[in-house]
Amino acid sequence: MAKRNLAEVAVGAAVIGLAAGFLGYAVAHSGRSSAAGYPMHAEFERIDGLTIGADVRLAGVKVGRVTETSIDPKTYQAMVTMTVAENIALPRDTSAAVSSDGLLGGKYINLVPGGDEHMLPRGGRITVTQSAVNIEDLLGRFIFSATNLSGAAAGAGAHPAAGATADGAKP
């Protein structure tokens, strides 16, 4: 009986240890941990799908992560705080765009450095920004424009009967 209880305790301890390991992994990879680097700020009209922990990339290489998103109560713009790796200095005319990994992929911030000789200060603000493209809006516009084109083509195809004059009377 004592051997059975010892085995049950050992299995229970192993299960609890495994659960703690999974929990630790989930917390470490949740994107909520503090990222190494210095903070930068940017404002966007919209950041659809951009989440805390999303990548910040420069030339396709991850150089940081999004650490905070909020709304400016005066301008109603989306404010994004991100970290950028310590060894990356950004020119003052750097632009930031909300991009996506493919059609259904996640969103990230894409940094494009400019040519200015002066660098943005740590904690500075990127002023040249491009908001997220809303795929649903684009698809709706495409369908609407295609419908309008087909309707215009159908209207243009209606010709008066052969031999009729402009007022519809036969000569």
Image (spheres, grey):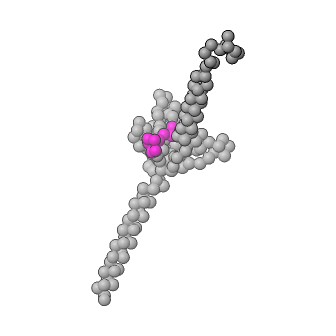
Q: Position of residue 47 (x, y in %)?
A: 55, 43
Instruction: Note whether residue 121 is visible.
Output: no
* Residue range of the region highlighted in magenta in the rendering: 97-105
Q: Position of residue 102 (x, y in %)?
A: 44, 41
Instruction: Note whether residue 161 is visible.
Output: yes
**In which quadrant of the rendered view does residue 44 lie?**
top right
Q: Name the residue located 51 percent from the left edge and 37 percent from the top edge.
A: 96
**In which quadrant of the rendered view does residue 48 lie?**
top right
Q: Is residue 110 magenta?
A: no
Q: Name the residue located 36 percent from the left edge and 72 percent from the top edge.
A: 15
Outermost residue on the front side: it is 171
Q: Position of residue 65 (x, y in %)?
A: 46, 47
Q: Would residue 48 be found to the left or right of residue 18 on screen?
A: right
Q: Is residue 34 above or below residue 1?
A: above
* Number of numbered discs visible in the structure rendering: 0
Q: Position of residue 43 (x, y in %)?
A: 58, 40
Q: Would residue 122 be found to the left or right of residue 148 on screen?
A: left
Q: Name the residue located 38 percent from the left edge and 72 percent from the top edge.
A: 16
Outermost residue on the bottom side: it is 1
Q: Name the residue located 49 percent from the left edge and 28 percent from the top edge.
A: 116
Q: Is residue 12 above or below residue 141?
A: below
Image quarter where the N terminus lies is: bottom left
Image quarter where the C terminus lies is: top right
Q: Nearer the viewer, residue 139 or 41?
A: 139
